[in-house]
Amino acid sequence: MKIGFIGIGVMGRSMAENLIKAGHDLTVYTRTAEKAAPVVEKGATWKDSVASCVSGMEAVITMVGYPADVEEVYFGSGGVIENAAPGAILADMTTTSPNLSVRIYDAAKAKGLSALDAPVSGGDSGAKNGTLSVMVGGDREVFDRFLPVFEAMGKQIVYEGGAGKGQHTKMCNQIAIAGAVAGVCEAVRYGEAAGLDMEAVLGCIGGGAAASWQLSNNAPKMLKGDFAPGFYIKHYIKDMRIAMEEAGASGLSLTVLPDVLDMYEKLAEKGMGDLGTQALIEFYK
């Protein structure tokens, strides 16, 4: 399939490379041309604008940073909605506002396009290994047609319902992570204060009821002081704020999420927003 791919960041680069490996014909655009160089070396074609990237493509995939970026890419001058080829499938894989996803769906439909909201989970390792979880909202028939493309990037690919439902599912994911990563941090700090060999502790509790992705993947990094970003703190803050807004709109009062958001915001205020989410351990120190 001829695909225009917009956003070659920590996640987007590996996702694009896996699409190329699967035999798709990729045209790419990102605001910093140098970031696209490794993907171009593997066979992608570089374009210098959103409009030229999506023109004539059968599909468009976007993987950018913030809702404002999604808004600009889709609705700005020279954006995706204005320039995508008739009949193209648009898949926004950014984690963004469910309401924005519905707006994209409606605007796409009015232009003879199809739109899916398809945020992912799995971090940089999932992107590299093609094992991402993909949560998809939109029309079922469009999802079925686009499934082989998603399968080049992920393993757990689930249709969640109409437009915006993929983003709502991602909010569930981010809410669940908040408690999990904070719990891991507290367990690590407790064990260290008790004088335990934390590598031995992780080996023991990681196979029991406390087992989790955060415990297996991020706890060892916490012990080593390895805060390289698999997922940026600044992006997780963005996600948690969206979840808080959506919860408030539904009349929900969450208790764990706002506490964890506050912790991360304090780290960001100290200039740590470009570190990985495992750096939450620094809050406890």
Image (cartoon, helix red, strand yellow):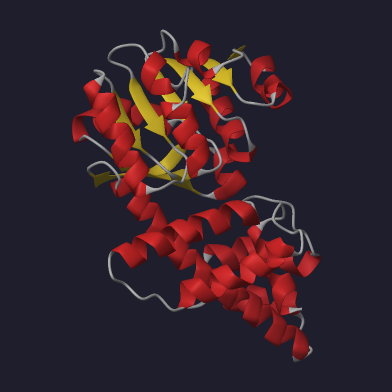
Please identify the quarter of the rendering in which residue 247 is found. bottom left
| 62 on left or right of 59 | right
Q: Determine whether 216 is above or below 90 in the image.
A: below
* Residue ranking furthest to the front: 77
Total number of numbered discs in the rendering: 0
| 61 on left or right of 272 | left
Residue at 55%, 68% in the rendered image? 261
Residue at 79%, 65% in the rendered image? 224
Quadrant, the N terminus? top left
Q: Name the spot of residue 255 as percent of width and height, x first.
A: 44, 79
Residue sitting nearer the eye, 198 or 14: 14
| 276 on left or right of 249 | right
Residue sitting nearer the eye, 210 or 266: 266
Residue at 60%, 38% in the rendered image? 128
Residue at 20%, 30% in the rendered image? 141
Residue 121 visible to an observer of this rendering = yes
Quadrant, the C terminus? bottom right
Q: Name the spot of residue 211 as percent of width and height, x first.
A: 52, 71
Q: Determine whether 220 is above or below 150 in the image.
A: below
Residue 1 visible to an observer of this rendering = no
* Residue ranking furthest to the top: 56
Q: Determine whether 105 is above or below 56 in the image.
A: below
Please identify the quarter of the rendering in which residue 263 is found. bottom right
Q: Name the spot of residue 271 as percent of width and height, x first.
A: 76, 59
Q: Name the spot of residue 250 as percent of width and height, x first.
A: 28, 65
